[in-house]
Image (cartoon, rainbow, N blue to C red):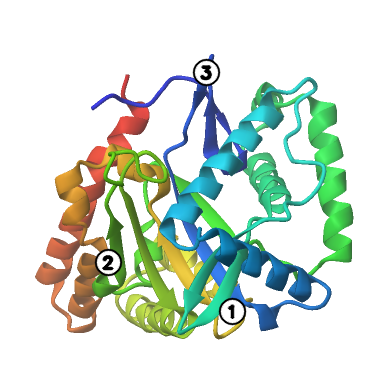
């Protein structure tokens, strides 16, 4: 299997730019909300959008993969523009659409908001000289001003999507049970919606919140404060911002291209995370260590590709 294409990592959705467009190896954590969660006139707009999507029969994983690919392409075009556009001038009017217990749910793309958020993280984590290697200073300053102006008018709006490159954070698996995993095989012609396999987990919001709360109780009782606890606390606070009848989805996205087909069929990280938490709660350090070993063993080969040549 080939390693990571060499190029420049773009903050917006972790895309990669070189002489040709290369699809990013990203996973996504999405929240889908019922129409009742949105105020008017946004609610009516999404209702019309859902009806249109249903008519075109693109609900489900295939539609999700198609929209993700379109979004990545648009992001790369903005980055390669002259001058570059680190965030689109207008917010996306599209969404991912799913269904839970017969109720349609939407996950707004919010491409502009997510690009702004990624740039804010870049300003926080990297010195100015690194930031300017991605975008001219004036471009970044204008994007920051636009974000701050928008945030003053929309203080409570949260991104419905988080992304992660080259791996799925362990805390994301806490939200799901192993039997909630769905593996979608390519179409008969071998192409599939995104050129291959798809793998995702989906669970009702109430289950995701309950699992986060249980996991935090166990971790706080058995471990010292650290990145895992802090990250899971942040994820829990994010989930609290959404409608209680929402749905949470973990989509492996482009990571399926890095995982052998046999390993995709036997993907059991959610099970190992659950086993590890149960072992910690029971005071069984040996069993908890074994679960952690399985998790790190599963993902170390994928993460190593980030630095492969």
- Of the pair 11 and 54, the residue shown nearer to us: 54
Lateral position of residue 227 relative to residue 179, left or right: right
Can you identify the residue that label 3 sits on?
A: 20
Q: Earlier in the sequence, mark 1 or mark 3?
A: 3
The alpha-carbon separation of the residues under discs 2 and 1 comes to 21 Å
- Of the pair 83 and 265, the residue shown nearer to us: 265
Secondary structure state at the residue bearing disc 3: loop
- Residue in the image at 25% along x and 73% along y: 179
Lateral position of residue 43 relative to residue 64, left or right: right
Quarter that holds the N terminus = top left
In the image, residue 147 lies at what x, y percent?
A: 81, 50
Can you identify the residue that label 1 sits on?
A: 240
Splitting the image into 4 quarters, where does residue 101 fall?
A: bottom left
Q: Crowdedness of circle 2 by 10 Å Cα count: few (<14), some, many (20+)?
A: many
Q: Which mark is in front, 1 or 3?
A: 3
Q: Residue furthest top?
A: 19
Can you identify the residue that label 2 sits on?
A: 270
Splitting the image into 4 quarters, where does residue 149 fall?
A: bottom right
Q: Residue furthest front?
A: 55
Splitting the image into 4 quarters, where does residue 237 fall?
A: bottom right
């Amino acid at each position: 299997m080939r390693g990571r294409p060499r190029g420049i990592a773009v903050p917006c959705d972790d895309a990669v730019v070189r002489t040709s467009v290369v699809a990013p190896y990203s996973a996504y954590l999405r929240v889908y909300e019922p129409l009742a969660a949105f105020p008017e006139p946004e609610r009516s707009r999404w209702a019309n959008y859902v009806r249109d999507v249903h008519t075109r029969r693109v609900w489900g994983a295939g539609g999700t993969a198609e929209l993700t690919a379109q979004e990545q392409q648009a992001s790369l075009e903005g980055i390669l523009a002259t001058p570059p556009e680190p965030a689109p001038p207008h917010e996306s009017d599209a969404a991912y659409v799913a269904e839970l217990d017969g109720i349609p749910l939407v996950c707004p793309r919010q491409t502009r908001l997510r690009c702004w958020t990624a740039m804010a993280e870049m300003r926080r984590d990297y010195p100015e000289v690194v930031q300017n290697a991605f975008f001219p200073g004036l471009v970044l300053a204008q994007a920051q001003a636009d974000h701050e102006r928008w945030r003053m008018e929309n203080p409570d709006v949260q991104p419905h999507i988080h992304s992660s490159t080259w791996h799925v954070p362990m805390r994301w698996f806490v939200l799901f049970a192993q039997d909630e995993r769905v593996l979608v095989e390519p179409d008969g012609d071998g192409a599939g919606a995104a050129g291959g396999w798809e793998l995702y987990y989906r669970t009702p919001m109430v289950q995701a919140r309950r699992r986060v709360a249980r996991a935090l109780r166990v971790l706080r009782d058995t471990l010292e404060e650290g990145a895992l606890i802090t990250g899971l606390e942040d994820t829990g606070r994010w989930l609290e911002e959404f409608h209680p009848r929402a749905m949470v989805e973990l989509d492996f996205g482009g990571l399926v291209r890095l995982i052998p087909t046999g390993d995709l069929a036997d993907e059991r990280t959610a099970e190992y995370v659950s086993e590890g938490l149960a072992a910690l709660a029971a005071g069984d350090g040996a069993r908890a260590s074994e679960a952690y070993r399985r998790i790190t063993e599963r993902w170390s080969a994928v993460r190593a590709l980030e630095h492969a040549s």
